[in-house]
């Protein structure tokens, strides 16, 4: 039972990171119908910028101030990067065949990876511990301070974003643009501005997620955004891409499935199946869900949207 509880905690922590990145995917897809495959690499840039900033400031400022300024720097860089990606790479192709933006997104992803490799190198970089190494025991399960911080921050961000989209003027404009950019324009909504804001919000979430995942594992790498982005996109599809709450649900479920596949099932099979197969378990469940419900857990069939 302690193993089950421990893996549940680990899965929720990992799933909350997936959910933050998945929200960026689902927001862009909901408005543009575009799969921004470069989003995972924006997360990687956020982690790298945070690492560089925190390392540079830690010798001159108190540690909490260095971490806060490092996070602010990562968010600012990622938001600028997201704005220019949308403005230069995607906006000119908005009315092009659907395959063109997809190929462009893959190209932007490769550019960001190689740019990060040139700046930070190929090696894995050690990420400093952001909080003291303390933990709490609950029925045999150990919850660390960084896990509590990740869960608390991620939950707060999710609640704020859900409120923003559902109960504010900006959120209504985003939902109207997602329904029809042309009709939203007739209502006085600047669709281009709303799309840019969506990219800015998604990029800010990616920066926070990059800091979280690097602090959790204690490592950062120029290639870390690829698999993280792929899993976050899978989480968005699992929950129902285009649905904010679906991205949150999908991210949490994917993290829990991965964690159980790596730990709990590994113990039951005496190590025959474990951490090396955690991705297999996660994507296997994703395939099964999509076979039963192709639109995802909370997604709506295309006929219902029309």
Image (spheres, rainbow, N blue to C red):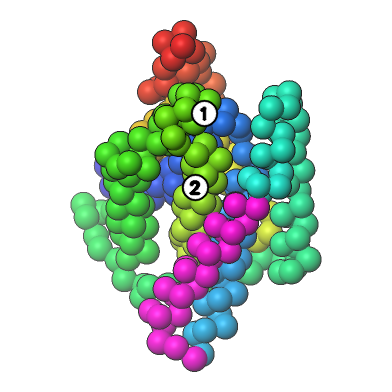
Q: Which residue is mark 1?
A: 181
Give the quadrant of the N terminus: top left
Which label sits on residue 236? Answer: none
Is residue 227 toward the left or the right of residue 305 in the image?
right
Q: Is residue 247 magenta?
A: no
Front-lying residue, 185 or 195:
185
Residue at image point 61% right, 33% down: 35
Residue 18 spot, x, y in % from top left: 47, 44
Residue 169 at least partly seen: yes
Q: Secondary structure at mark 2?
A: helix
Residue 219 at least partly seen: no
Q: CA distance from mark 2 to mark 1?
A: 14 Å
Q: Within 10 Å of the Cα at label 1, are there few (<14), some (14-19), or many (20+) other Cα atoms?
A: many
Residue 138: image quadrant is: bottom left
Residue 127 spot, x, y in % from top left: 54, 70
- The numbered mark, 2 or 1, whose residue comes first in the sequence reads 1
Residue at image point 60% right, 52% down: 83
Specify the farthest residue to the left: 139
Q: How many marks?
A: 2
Instruction: Please provide the residue range marked out in magenta.
Output: 60-84
Residue 46 spot, x, y in % from top left: 56, 61
Front-lying residue, 47 or 42:
42
Front-lying residue, 46 or 221:
46
Q: Secondary structure at mark 1?
A: helix
Question: Quick check: 266 above or below 66?
Answer: above
Specify the farthest residue to the bottom: 60
Q: Within 10 Å of the Cα at label 2, are there few (<14), some (14-19), or many (20+) other Cα atoms?
A: some
Callout in the foreground (2, 1): 1
Residue 152: image quadrant is: bottom left
Residue at image point 47% right, 18% down: 295
Q: Is residue 75 magenta?
A: yes
Q: Which residue is mark 2?
A: 197
């Amino acid at each position: 039972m302690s193993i089950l509880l421990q893996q549940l905690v680990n899965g929720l922590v990992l799933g909350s990171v997936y959910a933050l990145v998945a929200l960026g995917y689902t927001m862009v897809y909901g408005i543009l119908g575009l799969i921004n495959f470069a989003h995972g690499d924006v997360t990687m840039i956020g982690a790298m910028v945070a690492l560089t900033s925190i390392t540079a400031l830690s010798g001159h400022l108190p540690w909490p101030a260095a971490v806060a300024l490092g996070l602010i720097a990562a968010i600012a860089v990622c938001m600028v990067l997201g704005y220019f990606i949308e403005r230069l790479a995607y906006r000119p192709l908005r009315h092009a065949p659907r395959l063109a933006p997809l190929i462009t997104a893959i190209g932007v992803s490769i550019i960001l990876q190689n740019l990060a490799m040139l700046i930070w190198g190929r090696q894995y970089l050690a990420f400093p511990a952001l909080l003291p190494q303390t933990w709490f025991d609950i029925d045999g399960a150990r919850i660390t301070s960084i896990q509590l911080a990740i869960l608390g921050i991620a939950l707060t961000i999710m609640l704020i974003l859900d409120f923003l989209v559902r109960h504010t003027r900006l959120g209504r404009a985003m939902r109207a643009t997602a329904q029809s950019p042309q009709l939203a324009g007739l209502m006085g909504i600047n669709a281009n501005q709303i799309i840019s804001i969506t990219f800015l919000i998604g990029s800010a979430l990616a920066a926070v997620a990059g800091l979280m995942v690097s602090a959790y594992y204690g490592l950062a790498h120029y290639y870390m955004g690829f698999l993280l982005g792929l899993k976050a996109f899978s989480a968005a599809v699992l929950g129902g891409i285009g649905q904010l709450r679906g991205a949150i649900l999908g991210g949490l479920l994917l993290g829990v499935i991965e964690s159980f596949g790596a730990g709990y099932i590994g113990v039951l099979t005496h190590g025959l199946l474990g951490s090396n197969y955690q991705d297999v378990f996660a994507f296997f469940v994703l395939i099964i869900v999509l076979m039963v419900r192709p639109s995802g857990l909370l997604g709506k069939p295309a006929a219902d949207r029309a």
